[in-house]
Amino acid sequence: MITVDQLRAMALGRPDESNMASLAVALNAYGQRFGLEKPHRLAHFLAQVLHETGSFRWDTEIWGPTKQQEKYDTGALAKKLGNTPAKDGDGKRYRGRGPFHLTGRANYRAFTKWAKGIDPDAPNFEKEPDAILTDPWEGLSALWYWESRDINRYADDNSLEMVTRAINDGLNGLDSRMMYYGRAALVLLGYGTDRAEIERFQREHPDAGPADGIIGPKTRMALHKALKGRNPFAQEIPVPVPRPTVPETVEEEVQRRTGLWGWLTTFLGGGGAGLTALFGSDWRTVIAFGAVMLAGLLILIVLGPQIVRAIGRIRDAVEGRA
């Protein structure tokens, strides 16, 4: 469904190959289960991943701690994340991991419960937070989060703002997410991501607005419409063409006539060899044998056209003209 080469084309800078591969593994194995086989949804999903991971460079939240990260450990935000109110380091322990930077003990616990439903041997991520960074769980953590918040409904409406709020609980980095949406959508549609390719898309889709190489609201809507009208992941299944059958009446006739043809040609062929052997025999015997051969040849001349017509009837029957 998605390749690392496509993800690399969407990214900026120097993305981490292993991070891209982890996401591709999860999408290809489970994407359809989460409705992400639909390109217009996948473009929104990937735009959020690209922003959250800095173009696949990070799979773990960089720890400062910043003032915001300190709130993971104590206070109202810690309680909301399921961390203890005491300053005991669980803010850092359950910091963001995976493509969507899954954060907080409550999310690690909920993801564990869900993962056990897929595979009873899945790790306990609450006890082993770093296990989220193993395959296929790294990519699946993002798929689970996407589904648990029912984000496809916002992607179906092409509401990048609502998708962002569902991921980030706000509009942090909205401009970056919009930029990545354009890149993801273009690649999924088979375009490049530079200005010339944006202009080409705009020329080929008049509803995208002027061909100015800028992805604004009209172009984003045109990208969404183009993605909804196409499923590049569907495979055409060839329809077997049945072999033509010959009607029984035609087949019986041809067997009768061609059987006679075979008998005559065999007889005449054998007769020719016999005639050669008769050279040196009594002259009366040679004349008698020659008369029989002549009679067979006359029969063959008379029946030949009828046999040709029979073969023509077979051809017409096979081609549906009988």
Image (cartoon, grey):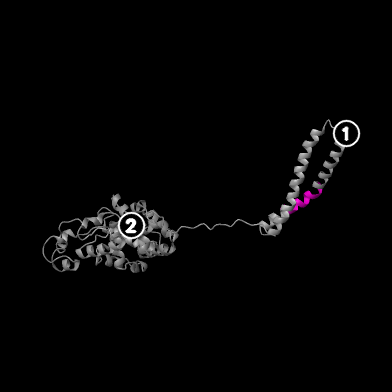
200 is within the stretch colored magenta:
no
Part of the protein shown in magenta: 301-311
Q: Amino acid at mark 2?
A: Ala
Q: Secondary structure at mark 1?
A: helix
What residue sits 33% from the left and 61% below the top? 45
What residue sits 32% from the left and 60% below the top? 47
User: Is 285 in front, or is 189?
Assistant: 285
User: Is 253 in front, or is 115?
Assistant: 253
Residue linked to disc 2: 26
Q: Position of residue 299 (x, y in %)?
A: 82, 47
Mark 2 nearby-residue class (10 Å; few <14, some 14–19, many ≥20): many
Quarter of the rendering occupied by the N terminus: bottom left
Image mark for residue 283: 1
What residue sits 78% from the left and 41% below the top? 268
Q: Position of residue 43 (x, y in %)?
A: 35, 61
User: Is 212 in front, or is 57?
Assistant: 57
**270 over 254 or under it: above or below:** above
Q: Secondary structure at mark 2?
A: helix
Whether residue 219 is visible:
no
Res 76 quadrant in image: bottom left
